[in-house]
Amino acid sequence: MTETLKIGLIGAGFMGKAHALAYATMPMFFWPAPAIPVRYAIADATDELAREAAERFGFGKAVSDWRRIVDDPEVDVVDIAVPNDLHAEIAIAAAEAGKHVMCEKPLARNAAEAHEMVEAVRKAGVINMVAFNYRRTPAVLLAREIVERGELGRLLNFRGTYLQDWSADPDSPLSWRFQKKVAGSGAVGDIASHVIDIARFLVGDVMSVNAVVKTYVDRRPVQSGLRDALGTARTSGAVERADVDVDDEVMTMLRFAGGVVGSIEATRNAYGRNNFLTFELHGERGSLAFNYERRDELQLFDAGDPGDRRGFRTIYTGPPHPHGAALWPIPALGIGYGETKIIECHDFVEAVTTGKPVSPDFEDGYAVAQICDALLESGESGAWVDVQGADKGVGAAA
């Protein structure tokens, strides 16, 4: 009989829904599953919201105090899908209680908090993971395989973007994502962190940064209600407004270990861009290009092609590619956001059942947090800033 794992999910918003979907469907895709996730308990801000979430997402228990999940001896896994200011407190408590921990990104508001989380899971010896799910898109995993096989030759540069427009409207409400005390940073931690994780995954450690950091909308309408509307709500007229104290955009140059150079741009104020997460990777023998809005595709250029055949060719991911056999039987049938969370769930559950480490773990989240801190420092000073603790080694992150 397949082993079961009892999941305690803390947070029932957008990310809570994504995680609940993954726990429910992972065994449908990956069979035999490494273990069956049991949606055991869910916590939200009030009893009413928690009861609604339990009914909607199929959890057996509903609580409004997350400590009841951490303290419950029946819980095997604590999954943290709440705003960033609670990540460290919950993760440390969960680790001390001997629970395996999944945490949404960014791991923490800053590197100091992330380091405390790393120390807690290391001391407890529990499996831990930070949810940078975009790296589990099959096309991104294929890009990693191509790099590791040396098909691009010596890597030269990386160019990444993550552009959205949900906060471009100044009448979009002041959610927690615009408040430093809760979020830690704006576009830097919220979306640039995803591109940073992919850059580390494909290229290796970032050694130093030189960034421009901008805030375009410095006051927004005060939000009513507890749910994060992510730009879907609008207000107008004479409404109460409060200060925004985080960044709307970051643009940065990068220096990687081993001599690779690069750049990243991330903003939530780019009208017309929905979830425009892209990268290009250039080497001495070829190039790769990816756009998440066309996530079934990877563009590959081979400099060895004859002159009359040169050009990017499109690879449509499917059964022959990473995790393809578990997903859909026809290439380009459609990989969605949910599938990346399902793959993430599988890899985490497999790690819990085997006891083997999984990546990205809290160490990876800490490394990304150190880069984010360096970006904000560089944005203030206008100078190159070395990333604290960056590995002096060469090669892609594990």
Image (cartoon, rainbow, N blue to C red):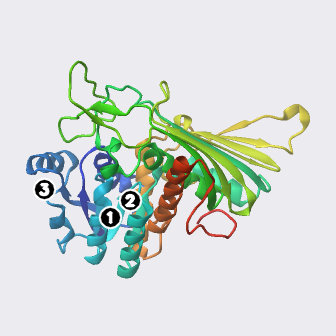
Amino acid bearing label 3:
Ser
Q: Is residue 264 left or right of residue 356?
A: right
Position above or below: 198 against 187: below
Q: Quadrant of residue 7?
A: bottom left
Closer-to-camera residue (287/199) = 199
Closer-to-camera residue (12/206) = 206
Amino acid bearing label 1:
Ala
What residue is shown at x 40% (from left), y 45% (from top)? 338
Mark 1 vs 2: CB contact within 8 A: yes
Position above or below: 337 against 110: above
Distance of mark 3 from mark 1, alpha carbons? 18 Å
In the drawing, what numbered circle is on residue 88? Answer: 1
Q: Nearer the viewer, mark 3 or mark 1?
A: 1
What residue is shown at x 30% (from left), y 31% (from top)? 220
Q: Is residue 137 visible?
A: no
In the drawing, what numbered circle is on residue 64? Answer: 3
In the drawing, what numbered circle is on residue 262? Answer: none
Q: Residues within 10 Å of mark 3 (few under 14, many from 20)?
A: some
